[in-house]
Image (tube, coloured by chain):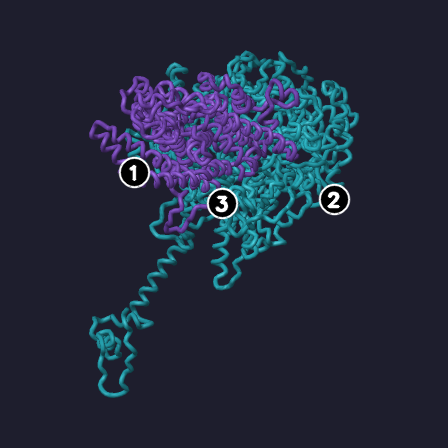
Chain colours: A purple, B cyan
Amino acid sequence: MDDYAAIKVQGPPVELERVPLVANQRGIGWLSDRIAGVVEGETPAWWKVCFAISVTMMTVCFAMILYLMSTGVGVWGLGHPVMWGWAIVNFVWWIGIGHAGTLISAILFLLRQRWRTSINRAAEAMTIFAVMCAGIFPLIHIGRIWFGWWLFPIPNSNSIWPQFRSPLMWDVFAVSTYFTVSVLFWYMGLIPDLAVMRDRAKTKIRKFGYGLFALGWRGSNRHWSHYEKAYLILAGLSTPLVLSVHSIVSLDFSVSQLPGWHTTIFPPYFVAGAVYSGFGMVLTLLVPLRRMLHLEEIIRVRHVELMCKVTLATGSIVGYAYAMEFFIAWYSGNPYERFQFFQTRAADPFIIGPLLHIRPAPYWWAFWTMVTCNVVVPQFFWFKKVRTCMLFVFVLSILVNVGMWFERFVIVDISLHREFIPSNWNYYSPTWVDICQYLGTFGLFFTFFLLFIRFIPLIAIAEVKGVTPQADPHHPLGGAKIGGEH
Amino acid sequence: MKTIPPNCPEPESGPKYWRSLDQLAETPEFRQWVEKEFPPGASEFTDPVSRRNFVKIMSASFLLAGLGSTGCRRPVEHIYPFAKMPENYVHGVPQYFATAMPSRRTALPLVVKSSDGRPTKIEGNPDLPGSNGGTDHLAQASLLSLYDPDRAMRCTRNGSGVSKKEALDYLSSLSKTQGAGAGLAFLLEQNGSPSRARLQQAIAAKFPAARWHVYEPVDLDLGRAAASLAYNSPVEPYYKLDQAQVIVSLDCDFIGSEENAYANIKDFAKGRALSGKDDPMNRLYAVESLFTLTGLNADHRLRVPPSMVVAVLARLAQNVLGSTEMDSKLNELAAPAQAHDKWITECAKDLKANAGKSLVLAGYRLPLAAHLLVMAINEALGAVGHTVEFHQVSSPKEGTLAELAAALNGGQVQTLVILGGNPAYNAPVDLNWPQAQTKAKTVIRLGYYQDETSWSESWVVRSKGVAPTQWDLPLAHYLESWGDGRTADGTMVPIQPLIEPLFGGITELEVLALIGGFTPNSPYEIVRETFRALGSQISLGSNVAFTAEPDKNGGGTFSYKWKPNSNAGDSENNWRKFLHDGFLAGSAESAATVQHDAAELKRALGELKAAPPPGKESLEIVFYRDAKMDDGRNNNNGWLQELPDPITKLTWDNAVLMSPATAKELGVFYDRNVQNQKFFNYQVEVTLNGRTIKGPIWIQPGMADHTVGLALGYGREKTGRVGTGTGFDAYKLRSSDNLYYASGATVKDTGDKSYELATTQSHWSMEGRPVVREANLEQYRKNPKFAQQMKPEDPPLIAPLYPNPLDTTKAKAMHQWGMSIDLNRCVGCSACMIACQSENNIPIVGKEMVGKSREMHWIRLDRYYASPAGAAQDKRMEDPQAVVQPMLCQHCESAPCESVCPVNATSHDDEGLNVMTYNRCVGTRYCSNNCPYKVRRFNFFDYNRHPLTHEFLYRSPLVAETDGEWELMRWLKNPDKGNLPEDQWQLSKLVKNPDVSVRMRGVMEKCTLCLQRIEQAKIAAKVKARDSDHIRLSEKEGTVPKTACQQACPAEAIVFGDISDPESSVSKAKEQERTYKVLEFLLTKPRLTYLARVRNPNQEMPDYKEHSLPYTTDEFEKGAFNEGEGAEEPAEKGAQ
């Protein structure tokens, strides 16, 4: 060790120095130990508690589905004219959350954003579980769940084909493709790490399990070469999907002629909103996790800060879209559009309503919750102090998701409850089944997520190593050196 | 494949070889040999004349001769399942029979569809002179009552079942034990049946001392009583509204709750119909305290408290009659109406200007003197003979319920026979009827339900063990009975059964005949004999005497008046024609020559007193006949319970109606306490003369101030599964001296807001949107195309990216279906809603589901209130105008619902129908979201298979048991069967139309324009066409079917037909200038168009300033649409 102590590292000037992505100049071996240690170590008590709660809630989710299937959609709060309620709101919300993972892993990969490596694995897992939660709702919200397979183009003796003009059909393809590619992409990236886990495994079961899924990875140059190419291809494939899936989901609404749904800006607006909520969810998950799993050196404050910036950017796009919706409603001169935005959404009983002499809208509180959470909340991220205060970020990230849930509620239900013919107008409120169903999907999500952090390295070991100075042979700390393992 | 061998020609000569035994058997030699071989007689079958044949023919002749000599075959009265298929009967092809539904004093002629022996749909009889085949919602819904599982199903004696034979024997025994009939009392409902009158007369002859009493809780027959007094002869008024140019209604809801409303609507709508801008149009003035359908259709409406209606009438009388000797009295009576003087004067001017073409109507709630005064006015206006004529009627001298109660309490009644009615529920509360009824020794009660008047345990307790022996007999439904009746104009109509009594029901005629000890006593024979007697004056044996001569003195107890009719009589042909046609041609009454006599009017006026105006501490109550429950008789009918009230749109309940101003004054004005379509309003206590009832409040815009409206017929203590728990009982406040109006009531807020009211429409304002388009007559004449101009700017028409396939296919299709609804003719009576429900197997969903806005009606009637745009906020609900609009699937040519269905469950056919494939529907409900009219209905639960309560609808079969069996297992065994009780399940299947599928849960449904009727018509046309290609349905040939709603509509507002036929009436209707499409700017291209409404206000009226534009037009033009300043809404859905 002494042989190398004399080597002086000539770094860039201090003001140009980048904050290292891994703190404390941790070595490659340390990274393996630390990340694999999360999986290999003792099961923490908090994990057990959280897991018990999650499994209970997941049971509620399935119980609600059984109740719904056996009894009828009537157990939800739907009625004329609001035929889509919480189920569709939750679907769009979960799908939106499922955006960040693939965005981080694919788009940031293509854009050479090296900071993505510490968070992409967890974000992708989050994506997959979120899409699973999302996928439940369109299936169970239909009246005859047992015929749900009719939405797939399966050749049958009646020669009845699905109707490809319907955006719901597009949804079926968009979501299932997105899910498939996301799973593949996630699993691809996992292979080298699974091999690490296999090599480190001490029990036969672990050895077998990890070994099975590591697909015989040996880390040879040829493997790595193939792996890198495949990863790049999948990243390229996933990138348009990130944009397409939520664009398609938004078409469910914009293809219809309902004021408040029939809006051409929906596709970009939904994608921005989805990224916004996805990053919000990543923050919600990783901010506490990095602390509880002692990963502060790998998921650094700088990572959190960068994510906050993405949140701020996409949140501002969302805010701009809201403004545009109002502007166009006014500018178009279409009285039904105007009514939808001014009378049905914005008119509150305190300021706007009295100012414009409009009766308060029945759901004004939902609209203003949405605006507060999606337009006002992200503005805090302009401030570095906010971005670096983990508690603050955590609270704001939750508000981001509350806001995005309300955004979907505003779009789906507020638009529906007062549309063209006033005799139809009605108020919509959920039932306990709606609420339990929604909470139940959290159970499903967290059950899977907890299992994920317990059994799979939640940070891409190989990739993080790749962005450390040690991985660069030309870096003074890089190359194969004695002691490089620490 | 089998190879067919080539023909092998027979050799011309040489020996004949037979190829098979069959060939051999065909040879003449062989046949001859066979005949010889067989025993003697075998050959005689081929012999044309032989002994055997002779005997055979002779024996058959003797048999037929025997039949002939004993007369005709007895008509089969029993209906059994077929052992052999009857001739001309095709399984699955419905048959139609003429019959009639008895109402109070008249009958509604019907044609009833019978599917495999069970009645499944009721239609009006279009063959009657002057009839258009329209019906009302009560007739439509009466079908469901037939299959009511809560009907009285057995004869009981003091609550325990006895055999029907025992009960009938007991009735027969009465005829022998009554002597002269002292102590025998009959309590009847009103009925116009000639047969019943004949039996009554015969019984009265046999038991001269028997008492006869008639009770109707809502007596719509006051006009007859008044006319008989005013003209000193037994006559009843018959209004010819189609002849009237100016109509003034004084608290007379002739469109809604008066007798024969369907006929009134037909005539009124005729006067409203506009085919072009130069057509005349009638004008309706309404003076009323409630907001009724008549008020809704009025051109000028004056809302006054009930006590003031008489004042308005008195002022009107002064104006019309000029100065008479009654002047001072009229002055006194008219004093309170001073404030409306100008209104009344101008109204009277209009009446006088149209003398001979004007008509004043008085409602059943007004006192007799008011009716007499109205008759004097009509007389002065020259209306008699033009817009009103008088028909001779019988005027039986029957006692009242109060007299009967007095007789019971006085111990003068030993045997009480109650036929129909439900006095224990609906008798005036001061009579204490339940107590009085126990004073008889024996009570015989014929009732449709086991209700309040039926025997109950509590009577024994109440009468300390000396309760009478009570026989309860099940009444047969009119579709199970033989009977007869008379329509509004006196035409005689038969009531013939469509089905054997389901539960052994007995008819009223049968009971009367048995008590009278007459033979024959079968209802069929009774009706047949009545018919026979109508042909001439004949005696029907010693028991049943009958005179067909009009009763000259009018004073006899039961003299039945009927002019002899040559179409009736003994002839079997006449009788068959009568039954086949459903009416007796030429039996309509003609106008009687009458002489007005004012003496009775003067006497009656003298007794009237001007009432003090009501106030906050002394409110006036109006007890009114409910639009659906009537007086409570329809309480267990689910279709009617779920039918929204035409004005309030309330279902399953009545409410304490009051005006917004009164509610504010009393501090019970509710606001923003609404969830979905549930309303949680204040419950108030209404106190009158020390009696109190409690009910939820309902703010009714346009009601008179300081007036409380209470609908009768709810809050039954003992009723079936459907009616239990609906509404509150307003009869509890009603006493003999204030049957319809009462003053001095107080209302106290209980602060309780827990009671839920369910309505089908919670938003009251049209928000200035051009959904219903209106103009006044003069504006319409100036600008006939006004309706097409009332719309937001159309989007630019650009060629669509994907051409609509219908545009190419419709050129090839044989028909193009379309519909036109004339909003000027539609009065909002709701008959179409029930007709649709009955035709299309639409389930009811129960109050809770209506509260969640899940009602299933395919056609609904939207009702909007409108006020002048400039009106002050608190004045907006005071005097609103209201409009109704039938809303159903618009069958858009480019339907938004179709393109969003992922499974192709809703699609377009070549003939322009938007069709729904229930089997394919998975229930994404996207189509409903994308439907701008929101006319699609979703089956949230299996409404056909569960009792409609929260407990049953919301319980999962995974954890529930029915009849001790795990529901899932039950379902696996028989997936069709839900957890309905067996009786309900079996009966609910019978009412279903076999031509329409019953939808399961999770499926979307909507109006199909009665596709099944179109298909049936097409099949019939194809069968008829045989090899020709004349299969196109044509209106001229009468092969185009009517939709159920169209057929039921008495106003002829709905026109359906082939729009590719330029001669069809729907094409003609669509060509009218008033035609418009709702939301046409969306370019959905609806096939259903509306004809805009036209109001006809009088420019001289003081309220014309506000009426110079219809309020809805005013709202639209003033841009309330953009500003969102519609009518103030207590019912606004801003809930938290």
Q: Position of residue A436 (x, y in %)?
A: 40, 24
Give me the chain letter of mark 3. Answer: A
- Residue B1013 in the image: above or below residue A289: below
Q: Position of residue A56 (x, y in %)?
A: 33, 23
State left or right for residue B871 relative to residue B144.
Answer: right
Give me the chain letter of mark 2. Answer: B
Q: Nearer the viewer, mark 3 or mark 2?
A: 3
State left or right for residue B501 relative to residue B189.
Answer: left
State left or right for residue A321 relative to residue B953.
Answer: right
Give me the chain letter of mark 1. Answer: A
Q: Judging from the image, what secondary structure is the residue with disc 3 in?
A: loop
Q: Judging from the image, what secondary structure is the residue with disc 2 in?
A: loop
Q: Nearer the viewer, mark 1 or mark 2?
A: 1
Q: Position of residue B182 (x, y in %)?
A: 47, 25
Q: Amino acid at mark 2?
A: Asp
Marks 1/2 in contact by CB < 8 Å: the verdict is no
Task: Determine the residue positioned at 40% across, 18% down.
Answer: B459
The crowd level at tag 3 (other Cα within 10 Å; few <14, some 14-19, many 20+) is: some
Query: On the image, which quarter does residue A71 sit in?
Result: top left
Q: Say yes or no: labels 1 and 3 on the same chain.
A: yes
Farthest right residue in view: B323
Residue B505 seen in the current view: no
Please give the residue where the numbered disc 1 appears in the rendered image.
A220
Query: On the image, which quarter does residue A24 sit in?
Result: top left
Q: Judging from the image, what secondary structure is the residue with disc 1 in?
A: loop
Residue B1108 seen in the current view: yes
Task: Determine the residue positioned at 62% across, 16% down.
Answer: B664
Q: Amino acid at mark 3?
A: Arg
Please give the residue where the numbered disc 2 appears in the rendered image.
B278
How far apart in space, not on screen, are marks 3 and 2 (Cα)? 48 Å
Q: Please give the label number shown on residue A165.
A: 3
